[in-house]
Image (tube, rainbow, N blue to C red):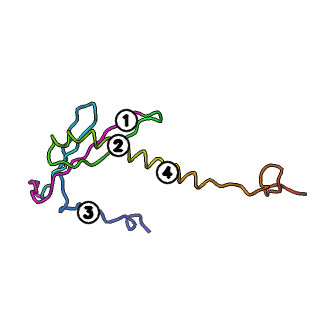
């Protein structure tokens, strides 16, 4: 059986096209403007322009990349809302890390009583 039969059918969605423009101040991060376009490449005025931001924060554990949506109607508004969007994305990332830590701690397996060293646990060869 060939691998080609197992590949998903991938097609470009002509009804959901966007032209992407990237703006950066080379310090705080980048803002992406996604302008909806028609298959002809002309602007689609029936759909809103979308904005998203990206930045990186240096933490004691290393660099933390953050990506987030910015509710804005213009590039100027997106720039004005960038700092608050970063703070919200950071708070969400911290909460997700805490939740992952709680889940990891709840999965810790505690051995049964007497199963430690010197106990009657398995794994020993008896003659």
**Foreground: disc 3 or disc 4:** 4
When the figure is inspected, residue 88 is found, relative to residue 5, above or below; the finding is above
Q: Measured from the top left, where is residue 33 in percent x and y?
A: 19, 46
Q: Earlier in the sequence, mark 4 or mark 1?
A: 1
Q: Residues within 10 Å of mark 2 (few under 14, many from 20)?
A: some
The quarter of the picture where the C terminus appears is bottom right
Q: Earlier in the sequence, mark 3 or mark 4?
A: 3
On the image, numbered disc 1 is attached to which residue? 57
Residue nearest the observer in this picture, 104 or 3: 104
Residue 114 shown left or right of residue 127 in the figure: left
**Foreground: disc 2 or disc 3:** 2
On the image, numbered disc 2 is attached to which residue? 66
Residue 105 shown left or right of residue 5 in the figure: right
Q: Furthest residue to the top?
A: 27
On the image, numbered disc 3 is attached to which residue? 11
**Structural distance between the alpha carbons of marks 2 and 3:** 29 Å
User: Range of the magenta residues?
Assistant: 39-58
Residue nearest the observer in this picture, 4 or 20: 20
Q: Name the residue located 26 percent from the left edge and 62 percent from the top edge.
A: 11
Q: Measured from the top left, where is residue 67 in percent x and y?
A: 32, 45
Q: Measured from the top left, where is residue 41 in percent x and y?
A: 11, 54
Q: Earlier in the sequence, mark 3 or mark 1?
A: 3
On the image, numbered disc 4 is attached to which residue? 100
Q: Residues within 10 Å of mark 3 (few under 14, many from 20)?
A: few
Task: Determine contact: label 2, label 3, CB under 8 Å.
Answer: no
Does the magenta run of residues contain 95?
Answer: no
**Structural distance between the alpha carbons of marks 4 and 2:** 17 Å
**Structural distance between the alpha carbons of marks 3 and 4:** 35 Å
Does the magenta run of residues contain 41?
Answer: yes
**Foreground: disc 3 or disc 1:** 1
**Structural distance between the alpha carbons of marks 4 and 1:** 20 Å
């Amino acid at each position: 059986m060939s691998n080609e039969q197992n590949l998903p059918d991938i097609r470009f969605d002509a009804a959901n096209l966007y032209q992407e423009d990237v703006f950066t101040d080379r310090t705080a991060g980048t803002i992406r403007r996604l302008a909806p376009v028609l298959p002809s490449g002309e602007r689609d005025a029936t759909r809103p322009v979308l904005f998203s931001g990206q930045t990186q924060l240096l933490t004691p554990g290393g660099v933390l990349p953050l990506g987030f949506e910015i509710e804005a109607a213009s590039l100027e508004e997106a720039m004005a809302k960038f700092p608050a969007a970063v703070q919200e994305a950071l708070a969400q990332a911290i909460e997700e890390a805490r939740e992952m830590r709680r889940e990891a701690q709840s999965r810790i397996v505690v051995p049964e009583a007497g199963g430690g060293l010197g106990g009657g646990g398995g794994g020993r060869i008896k003659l």
